[in-house]
Image (cartoon, rainbow, N blue to C red):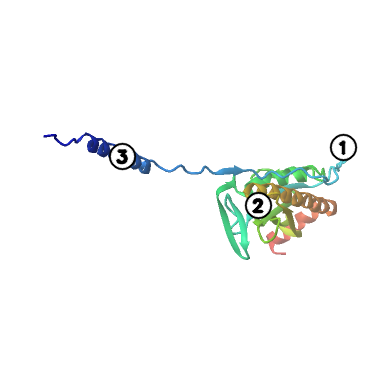
Amino acid sequence: MKLPSFACPVRICAAGVSLAMAGGCGLMKPAATEQPSFYSLDGAPANTRPAIRPVSMLSSTAPTLIVSPPHAAAGFDSKRIVYVREAHKLEYYAHNQWADTPARMYAPLIVAAVESTGAFRAVVQTPSAAAGDLRLDTEIIRLQHEFGSLPSRVRFTLRAYIVDNPTRKVLAWREFDATSPAASEDPYGGVVAANRAVQNVLEQLAVFCTEAAAIWQPPNVEGLKRAEGRNLFGR
């Protein structure tokens, strides 16, 4: 009598166990996470720049400008890149962000742009022990990639104040707004457009500061001393 053969079923069971173990190992392996991309905000080269006066023509009475650290409105004070698909709704790219907050990246760009005009004896970024005649305070109102039209665009809005440093009086203020179309409908297209919009506002801001320097008058030192004396003694 011929005995039944168990070799074939055993081989089938062994193969099934092997496949199950391989599948289980695949499930246990952690899924690869997408690495974030970091972008800089440094301003794209522009075709035109404010007229620059030679240093030799700079008056010895030209003011010194103190540049305060820029502030940012709520929602724009982090490293996250903002995009907008619906009005009043801010969204953030998941795997793309700025290398630093826009406000921190913007500060040295302001100094370089204003300094290049030659309208000031010196342009100093705070914190610094240097004393200044005028102070520039800025606030980023928005920096967002807008998808309401094709092509999409980036909008950058900045509010600036020129303050007389000794008296703390606001001499002038202005709001700058620039938009730039994106070359592609993705985060990188928005970053490139953002740099163009930033450069546009930098140029306007430099002109604004130059105009303030042109109308600034050195303080009457004796008059200030008399005014301080009256305030001190209540007369």
Q: In terms of sequence position, does the residue under pointer 1 or pointer 2 come before the other?
A: 1
**Marks 3 and 1, Cα distance to the nearest angstrom?**
80 Å
Circle 1 crowding by C-alpha within 10 Å: few under 14, some 14–19, many from 20: few
Residue shown at 67% from the left, 48% from the top:
189
Q: Which residue is situated farthest in the right direction here?
A: 57
Give the numbered dot on residue 185. 2
Q: In terms of sequence position, does the residue under pointer 3 or pointer 2 come before the other?
A: 3
Looking at the rendered structure, the secondary structure element under dot 1 is: helix
Looking at the rendered structure, the secondary structure element under dot 3 is: helix
At label 2, the amino acid type is Glu
At label 1, the amino acid type is Ser
Please give the residue where the numbered disc 3 appears in the rendered image: 21
The location of residue 60, given as percent across then percent down, is: 84, 42
Q: Nearer the viewer, residue 24 or 107?
A: 24
The location of residue 19, given as percent across then percent down, is: 32, 39
Circle 2 crowding by C-alpha within 10 Å: few under 14, some 14–19, many from 20: some
